[in-house]
Image (cartoon, rainbow, N blue to C red):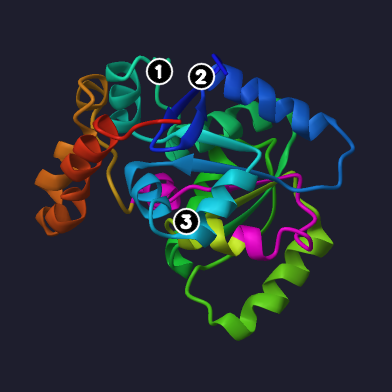
Amino acid sequence: MNNVAKIMGIPFPKITMDQTLQELSKVIEKDKSELFHVVTGNPEIVMSCQHDQSLRSIIDEAGLVTADGIGIVMVSRLKGGNLPERVTGCDLLIKLLEAGNQQKWSFYFLGADDATSKKAAEVISQTYPNVSILGRHHGFFKQEEDARIVEEIQSLAPDFLIVALGAPYAERWIHKYRLYLNAKIAIGVGGSLDVIAGKVKRAPEIWQKLHAEWLYRLIKQPSRWRRQLILPRFALSALFFKEH
């Protein structure tokens, strides 16, 4: 398929942020009961899929996989896939809130610590007053609390379920309860609520434009270096991977 770029076997549609928003708007407008799962595919998820078959099947079943990170985009271009731009979880969430403010969409937020979750909800309410926040729950819950949280989301029936539990846990959680959540779209957004709440500072725009956000984060949080090691490993593995 010419409209898809494969990275280590994972298909990434060649769509921009604006096209992604258009696709998700169409899903909201439909009266479909089936949950539409959006995976923001970063290098960690792609690498994990190489040895984790259960995660791979979750990604294969997703409604949409977006290019979360410049590493995905750069590798696709070097291999002739030519993904147009990155569509990160954080950027996508902001765009959805902007669109939701016009369309009066409803959201449920799951993840982050309780203070961050509360602060993020306050910021969103002030910035996007027409967005309906139907509910929220922090991300530090035990497995035995899952049923109660799923029940709450099911009864509220949000347009968007935003899950900030970190990858790939968010993807597994969404997939596990996909038949019961009663949301139209569910998205794993990593630490985006931390950014919205102001707990974590986003890289300045110039760093983003230079595609060096990862370097900014590393300078600000040197403890991330172990996590960042996956980036060169991913680049080498993906470049030499024989796509079928």
Q: Residue at x 14, y 46 (%)?
A: 218
Closer to the camera: disc 2 or disc 1?
A: 1
Left or right, 161 with reference to 39: right
The quadrant where residue 156 appears: bottom right
Q: Of the residues under marks 3 and 2, which one precedes in the sequence? A: 2
x, y percentage for residue 138?
A: 52, 68
* Disc 2, SS: loop
Left or right, 40 with reference to 235: right
Q: Of the residues under marks 2 and 1, which one precedes in the sequence? A: 2
Q: Are marks 2 and 1 in contact (CB under 8 Å)?
A: yes
Closer to the camera: disc 1 or disc 3?
A: 1
Amino acid type of the residue that numbered disc 2 sits on in the rendered structure: Lys
Is residue 208 one of those drawn in magenta? no
Q: Which residues are magenta?
A: 174-198
Rendered image: mark on residue 119: 3
The residue indicated by pointer 1 is 81
